[in-house]
Amino acid sequence: MAFPHIRAVLFDKDGTLLDFDKSWAPVNRSTASWAAGGDPEFAERLMTVAGFDPLTEKTRSGSLYAAGNTAEIAEAWRAAGVSLPLGELIAELDRRFTENAARAVAVPRLAETVGGLARRGFLLGIASSDSKGAIARFVATVGLSERFAFIAGYDSGFGYKPGPGMLTAFSDQTGVPAAQIAMVGDNLHDLEMARAARAGLRVAVLTGTGTREELAPHADLCLESIADLPEALAAATANS
């Protein structure tokens, strides 16, 4: 399979650069408990609404926790009965999610993979449904801030996934045409954004909430993790 010459890589964050369930299960529980005013049954209902199973501590693919942003979670929780004003709820969720970024569990070989791609000359970016502040805190915590030329969250003004805005902004800011950008993510929102923006390569990884059966039909490549990406890119670009 041949692809255009890839010069840049845009990563999703949750489930792609960090281990989704290990990173988010604790904060999902604590945040839902806070929003529910300490009522355990209400907290479980809020977690279920957002796509988290309190028994298995797994997040449902395509759910609000997996693919939504803070504003969408807040709106769903308001509809489920949380009485806090929407603006206050969004602000507190963003604060808690940003604080959690410092405790996030990176996927194996993250620094090695990102560093290797950067040394080979790829321009790198992150497009997440989390806030820009949370993304910045995560990459600072893992010591990779200087590796990324671009970060965008749901609050960066480029629109939400699966719209094309974040990838288009990455293209505009780096000067790399979308046809020479690989988008890497763990759910359909990432792949749909890549398609909408006409990215040159759609790469699914299986370290998040999406399954091979769900993602592979919509991806050019389906990898176990980003650790497989350098070799896959080398093969893809060699055949372009």
Image: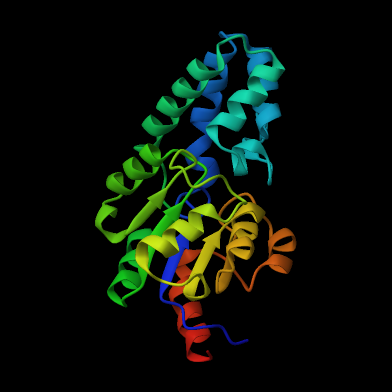
Q: Is residue 215 above or below residue 21?
A: below
Q: Is residue 223 above or below residue 78?
A: below
In terms of depth relative to the viewer, which is nearer, 132 or 34? 132
> Observer-nearest residue: 157 or 17?
157
**Image x and y of residue 70, in percent:** 53, 32
Say left or right for 47 vs 165: right
Q: What residue is at 49 percent from the left and 53 percent from the top?
A: 166
Res. 108 visible in picture: no
Q: State how many labels appear.
A: 0
Q: Which residue corresponds to the image point at 64% horizontal and 21% vertical from the top-left?
A: 77
In this orientation, does residue 160 appear?
yes
Image coordinates for residue 228, horizontal then vertical, percent: 49, 71
Relative placement, left or right, of 192 versus 201 is: right
Quadrant location of residue 101? top left
Q: How is the image coloured?
A: rainbow
Question: Where, by quadrant of the figure, is residue 153 drawn?
Answer: top left
Q: Position of residue 225 (x, y in %)?
A: 52, 63
Locate the N terminus by quadrant.
bottom right
Residue positioned 30% across, 49% down in the render: 142
Vertical arrangement, residue 68 with respect to residue 86, above or below:
below
Q: Position of residue 146 (x, y in %)?
A: 25, 57
Viewer-nearest residue: 54 or 193: 193
